[in-house]
Amino acid sequence: MNHNWQSSVLKRLAAVLGLSFAFGIIFDQVTIFLLLACAFYLAWTLRQLFMLGSWLENSSSLSDPQEPPTSRGSWGDIFDSIYRLMRKQEKLRDRLQAVIDRIQQSTSALQDAVVMTNRHSLIEWWNPAAEHILGLRSPDDHGQLITNLIRHPRFVSYFEQKSYQDPLDMPSPVSEQRTLLCSITLYGPDNRLILFRDNTRIHHLEQMSKDFVANVSHELRTPLTVITGYLETLAHSVEIMPQPPVPVLPKAVGQMQSQSHRMSNIIDDLLTLSKLETADSQQDIQPVSLPLLINTIVEDAKSLSGNKNHKIIFNCAHEDQILGNKKELRSAISNLIFNAVKYTPEGGNISIRWTVSLNTGYLTVKDDGIGIDPQHIPRLTERFYRVDKSRHASTGGTGLGLAIVKHVLLRHDATLLIKSRPGRGSSFTCQFPHSRLVKKAA
């Protein structure tokens, strides 16, 4: 539109009024001629408005806007400007629709189920794979509450929370024999993009791996017990011999005993992990007094420290108990404290603190030992992960301690926070939720 259309309208109105005023003077009827001019101008303006309204109404019902009505002057500029804006908007709409079509085509080609919900948790769209994996049906399920269609308690709890950092492993609503991996992304005003991936094969492989490790560990325990027994007998025989037939025999027997004990510890840890992964998490649940439990572990840690003269201090700021399995909690806490003893140099300090803050329990084991490079921290709880193989060989570690800690805490709805720097020691904090805290009875 011409930037001077306002002045053009005023000039046209001034010309009409001036011409009517001149004719009024000539015919001595100024008022009448001015009124006629205003009426004519108003009628012409109303006609242009009616033409504009009719054109806009007809164009809105069509995908392609009609040509604008023929007009002159400022109204012609208005019609042309609106038409150009409509054409521009039409091209923009076509481009956006093309992008949406490509996105829908790409998601339709995915083998994973994709579901989109609005801020009210109502299903707005899903791809064809969702019908096969989740059993959704069109158009009946459109606009339905997703938690009414996928009713598994774990999914409902996962969906209603606002943090989706970790994916959810859940059974398929179509078949209990299939396992799905669900991940949710928030976008816009509480809208959700939900991705379901068939995780059945990986789940089966993981289960086969766990069963294999458990079975092999169980089968190795009996022959290892026999070997250990004979080695103890042989070691006792060597001790009472006045002169061993082979000079290196005492050293060889000692090394065999050491390695057999190490292998026995590995098998015990593997069996413990297998039990944690398969046993019912609600088994033998009772209020556990952490101060009493930790005090007994600290005494064992002092014995383990021996001549290293570690200064081990336990501070208890609260008497709150933990609702859980005492044997499992002892295994996790002892692993953390014994690790601190193993990796802290002679004369080092080890502090254990139990406190409750903001309805959350914190058990912290801190040392001033050799520390760990931050790049290794995310993988510390993996099985057999070793920061330094030579260090594990010298301390006799199995590489399974922190994996056991992780599984015990998961079974108690707790998390493990690790902070460490090389040469500055390490800090391991077990964070227990309010649901696991129990006030000590008077």
Image (spheres, rainbow, N blue to C red):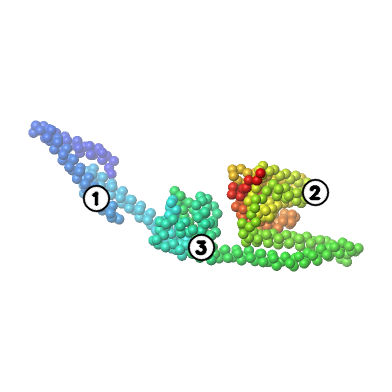
What amino acid is labelled 1 in the image?
Trp
Above-or-below relation of 253 to 339: below
Which residue appears at 72% of the width and 50% of the height?
Answer: 297
Say which quarter of the image contains residue 411: bottom right
Identify residue type, mark 3: Ser
Going by the numbered disc 2, the residue's amino acid type is Asn
Residue most extreme to the front: 442
- Is disc 3 surrounded by few (<14), some (14 to 19) or many (20+) residues within 10 Å? many
- Which of 292/181 is in front? 292
Which residue is at the front of the view, 165 or 25? 165
Q: CA distance from mark 3 to mark 1?
A: 54 Å
Residue count near mark 1 (Cα–Cα under 10 Å), binned few <14, some 14–19, many ≥20:
some
Measured as percent of width and height from the top left, residue 140 is found at: 40, 61
Image marks 3 and 1: residues in contact by CB distance under 8 Å: no
Residue 378 visible within the image? no
x, y percent for residue 315? 69, 43
Q: Residue 356 at what x, y percent from top left?
A: 63, 44
Task: Name the residue at 73% across, 59% down.
Answer: 265
Q: Nearer the viewer, residue 387 or 281?
A: 281
Cβ atoms at labels 1 and 2 below 8 Å apart: no
Residue that numbered label 2 is attached to: 307
Residue position marked by numbered label 3 in the rendering: 172
Which image quarter holds the N terminus?
top left
Residue 30 image-quadrant placement: top left
Could you say whether the residue bearing mark 1 is in a helix, strand or loop? helix
- Residue in the picture at 73% in, 61% down: 264
Name the residue that disc number 1 marks.
55
